[in-house]
Structure formats: C-alpha cells, structure tokens
Image (cartoon, coloured by chain):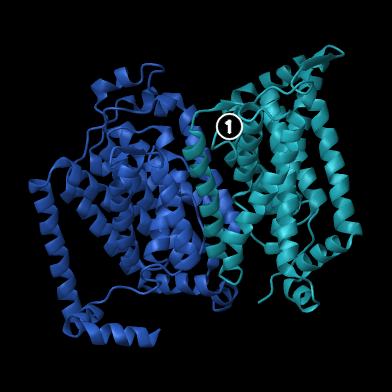
Chain colours: A blue, B cyan
Amino acid sequence: MKKRDMILTIIGIIALFGLAFFVQEEMDSYIRRIVNLCLVYAIIGLSMNLTNGFVGQFSLGQAGFMAIGAYTVGIFTVPVEYRENIFYAMPMNPAIADIELPLWAALILGGALAALFAFAIGTPVLRLRGDYLAVTTLGFSEIIRIWITNAQSITNGALGIKDIPPLNDVRYIFLVTVICFVFITLLVNSSYGRAFKAIREDEIAAEAMGINLFWHKNLAFMVSAFFAGIGGGLYGALLGTVDPKNFLFTLTYNFLLIIVLGGMGSITGSMLGAVIVTAGLEYLRFFDEPLMLFGMDIPLFRPGFRMVIFSVLLMVCVLFWRHGIMGTREFTWQKAIDFVKNPLGFIKRKGAAQ
Amino acid sequence: MEYFDAIANMSALSFAQHMVNGISLGSLYALIAIGYTMVYGILLMINFAHGDIVMMACYFAFFGITAFHIPWYFTFIITIILTAILGVLIERSAYRPLREAPKNSILISAIGASFLLENLANYLFSGRPMRFPDVPLLSQNISIGGIEIQAICLVIPVVTILSLVVLLHIVNHTKTGMAMRAVSKDYEIARVMGINIDNIISITFIIGSALAAIGAIMYGIRYPGITPMMGVMPGLKCFIAAVIGGIGNIKGAVLGGFILGLGEILIVAFFPDLSGYRDAFAFIVLIVILFYKPTGLLGEKTTEKV
C-alpha cells in the first residue's frame, strides 16, 4: 500500500468515526438503530464473503453461527439477579448461573465458540463440494437452532432470553466493524488470502501447487464463523432479546443478497451491499402497510409484500447482474482520485476496459 | 441400558404401528426425492425450489377443494397439472438463463426461487396454518389386526410403487427416456447427437413436479397442517435421501427415501428423548454416507477430471 493511500484510509476511518459520533449524539433512535443494523450486517456479510467469495466454498451456515454468538451474549451478560425470572420454566444450569461477563468478553467468547463449532463440523463437512456443502451447512445451522430450542436449562428453550442489557452505541459497533474490516483485509491480502483465491479458481491446480486445501478451507471457515459469532452477539445485544425463531436459516439469505449485490469476493462491495440491503429493507417497510391512494385501498400492499420484493430482488440480481456492484474488484483511492479529477474520462475508460 | 429395556418392552403391536408409519413416510420421501435426483442427474444442480413446489401443490389442492368446491378426484388431477406447469415455469425463468453461468450462480438462483415461492405463498395465502380438507375414504381411520391406521397409509406405498414402475418404464424403454439418460451421461455429446436438450430438461421438470404433486397430496392428507414453510424440511430431507441412494439414480432415491423415513420414525419410537432432534437425523446420516461412500449406496464411481 502506498503511503498516500495509507494516510487517506486512516483519514477516512477517522472521518467515519466522527460521523458515528455525530449519529450517536445528534440523530434520533430510529436512525441510530438502522445505522447499527447496517454495521452488524456488514460484519456478518464480510464473514460470509470470506468463505463464499474468496475461498469459493458455498456455505449457508451463517444464521447458526450468529445464534451461537447471540446466545453466548444473552446467557452471560444478563444480570444474575434477573435470571431467576427469565428462566422461570426451568432453572438455569448451576454451572453457568452465576457467571456474568462484560459485553466485550461475551462477544469474544461467542466468536470463539462459533469458531470451535465451525472447526468441529468443518473437519467432515469441508470435504464436500458445492451443493453438498450448501445443504449440509444449512442443515447444521438448523441443528444448532433445534439444539437451542431443546437445551432449556442453558438457553431457556423456545421462550428465549429477555432483558439483555441493550447496546445502543454506534461508536462501539463501528469500532468492532473497523476491527473486522481491517482483519479480513489483511488476511485476504496475505499469503493465506492468495491461497484462498487459488482454491476458489481451481482446487485441483491449487492442491498441485502445494496448498493444503483442508487447512486453508478450515481456517477460512473458522475465521468466518468467529466474525459471524461476534456479529450475532452484537445483533442479540442490539435487539435486547434472543429467541430461536430469530435465527431461522432464512436469515442467512439476507447476507446472501448482501454479498451477491455487493460482489462475491469484494470486501468494499460487501460493506456497500450491507448498507444498501439493510437500509433498503427498512425503507421498503411501507410495502407492508396498507396504502390509500385517492381514497382507494390498494390491495397489493399488505404484510408479506416486502419479502416478496426482497426475493424478487435476489433473483433479478443473480439473473441479470451476476457480478454485483463491485464484482471481485475493490475500492481504491487511485480510482477515486481519477474519478474526481476527470469524471467523464474515468467512466469512458471504464467502459472501454469492459 | 434403559433404552434396551424400552425396546424389549415395546410390544409387537406398537412396533407394527411404527413400521406402517415409517413405510408411509418413507414412500412420501421417495416420491419427492425422485424429482431431486432426476434434475441433479441432468443439470447437476440442486433444485432448491422442489420442496416449495410440494408446498404449492398442497395449496392448489387445498383451494381446489375448499374454495372452488371441485370434487376431490378432479382437484387432484388439476393439482398435478398445475404443479407440473409451475415446475417448468421455474426452470424456464430461473434456471435456463443461467445454463452457461458458474455453478454458484445457479445455486443462488435456485435458493432465490425457493425463497420467492415461500414469500409469495406467505403473501397470497397468509402465514396461518391451514387444515388440509378430509378426503372421503382416504382420511378415515381403519383398524387391521388391532392397529389403528389411516387408510391413506396403505395407499401411499402402493401409489409410490406404481409411480416408480411407470417412471422406470419411461426412462428405460421409451425414446424420451433414452434421450434423458443420454443427456445425463454427457450433456455436450447428447446435444451434438441432435437431442433437443431444452425439451428433455422441460420433460424432466414435468415428471419431477408431477411426482412431487402426487406426494404433496398424500402428504397433505397424512399430515393436514399446511403452511408456507412446510416444504423446506421435507425438501432438504428428500435431497439427502437422493444423495444417500446415489444422486442421479432413481432406484437409489427410493431406497434413500425409505431409509430416512423408517429411520426417523423408528428412532423417535425407540428413543423418545431424542424426538426433538428428529430433523437432525437426516443430516447426520448424510455426513456419514458422504464420508464413507461419497457416491451414495447405488451410485456409480466417478473420478474428478482436471
């Protein structure tokens, strides 16, 4: 990285940090909530892009890893004195009933548990390819949810955990997002990252070049699960309550849309996709409300319409715009400067290059 | 030890009851699994939307009987036709444009199609569970030698075996079937030999969806609660059944369906503690099978080429 780019990146992050401060202090709680959700979705979208976009292993287990992180935060950050009321149907397992952790520790623990679980299932599962891997990871994310529903003394089963100390601090979540962003960028640009991309392009050729397929796939899977766990923990803290129904496998499809829209294999694309999808889903809420136009009730608008549009969007994206916004390219300062200096010429050259 | 006691204490009567339940569930899985295995054999993709096609077929039959008051036998025929049309429609709009695209794009498109059907059903029919109407004769309970069973339990295996015989005849002894086998053996060469690939793929989807509709109707009579998400779990399990038997192999899909259906019912019967983990059983079987016999029980050996 050039010195200029490094300085610009740092300035950019500081500017965004300032923006986060501004949102925290000046904006109302609705805006704060959307910004928080964008950041959390960006973390999980990035983590999913690592396995799906960079290593080319199609995994659909993100909802399960999120559930592990969210429940770890839920179980360990709820104040001890509330627990008796929350676990009224079945008392909490005495081994964990008195342990209370601060949020950051619970987040890291949740990420670590998710990574551990990813390691345990990755060993058999990552030998599978393509479609099989997708189905099996989807299955495991459902199995996690089934286990959570059944393990009542630990997770309070189907009742969920309420009264998690709410987190409504944009700066905190922004900081975690930056750490995740920097870590994944460094990882992708390291020799590991080059190995990941080699596996994506051609597994057999990569193996012939001496890349240990099993170890690299497993590493990516674990890092991905770790950040999905942290993202899930933040998600749980943001909602203030966790419930097995929050982590249906359909939750994973949100992140699938984010990485397809942003571009599979582009870090900045995932960030962009996360913002567009989250904010878009939020602002499309009016589709679910009944709509009166000129005194007439438009029957099209009723609950569920938003999700129909959402799924059509996913289809349109993959059918007509397969590379998404960024493809496998990244945002670079050089391109941005070229654009600012000569917008028309930049677009022309870009068109010529394609 | 207590489990062994439980098995010893289980009377022959209740064992027979569980066997009947298991065989009828296995037959349903087999019918749906055939659709997965045929599509995979030809296009090398999971038709993620197949489970949701089952769901839509249930709704078609439901509305035919309750809203339009069509006699049930006509409703079932209309349902099969509508479902076949739906299957072809999905193939045309979601899979055909991506035929030359990378495999991951097709997979995402299939997931999108499945998600769209679920959301569409949720939007059009509301998420509230509806009760599949009772069908004369089939929904009644009858008692044979002391065990109470629903009449449909006896019909399901018979219909499944009949469908299988017809299907095997089509695949093995007709010109269309020969073309289907050729396409699944080598897509490119079949095209060069003058086989109309698009037609063959459409026919595959028609057959798969029609069998799914037959399965869906019987599933609805057997398990009457229908919801927009009802197709997801059976869909995943039937895909697993197809993989266990050896993907691309029709007899294998049926074998896999029976293994999963019987296994699921018997595990819950023998170990009632594990009933919450009933849905996990299929995935564990999948992992074990892929570990020891990656091409499935009846699958052919393949080697990976560069």
Quarter of the image where the C terminus of chain B is located:
bottom right
Q: Is residue B273 left or right of residue A103?
A: right
* Frontmost residue, B85 versus B91: B85
Q: Position of residue B44 (x, y in %)?
A: 67, 62
* Residue, disc 1: B277
* Frontmost residue, B234 versus A149: B234
Q: Residue furthest right?
A: B173
Q: Position of residue B245 (x, y in %)?
A: 76, 49
Q: Position of residue B125 (x, y in %)?
A: 51, 35
Whether A58 is drawn above or below A138: the answer is below
Q: Kindly identify the residue that appears in the image at 69 percent across and 40 percent down.
A: B79
Q: Is residue A31 in view from this perspective?
A: yes
Q: Kindly identify the residue that appears in the image at 87 percent across and 40 percent down.
A: B162
In the rendered structure, which amino acid carries the disc numbered 1? Tyr
Quarter of the image where the N terminus of chain B is located:
top right
Res B27 quadrant in image:
top right
At mark 1, the secondary structure is helix
Whether B60 is drawn above or below B136: the answer is below
Q: Position of residue A147 (x, y in %)?
A: 50, 33
Res A257 quadrant in image:
bottom left
Number of labelled discs?
Answer: 1
Q: Is residue B263 in view from this perspective?
A: no
Res A233 quadrant in image:
top left
Q: Kindly identify the residue that appears in the image at 50 percent across and 43 percent down.
A: B120
Q: Is residue A169 left or right of residue A322?
A: left
Tell me the subunit letter for badge 1: B
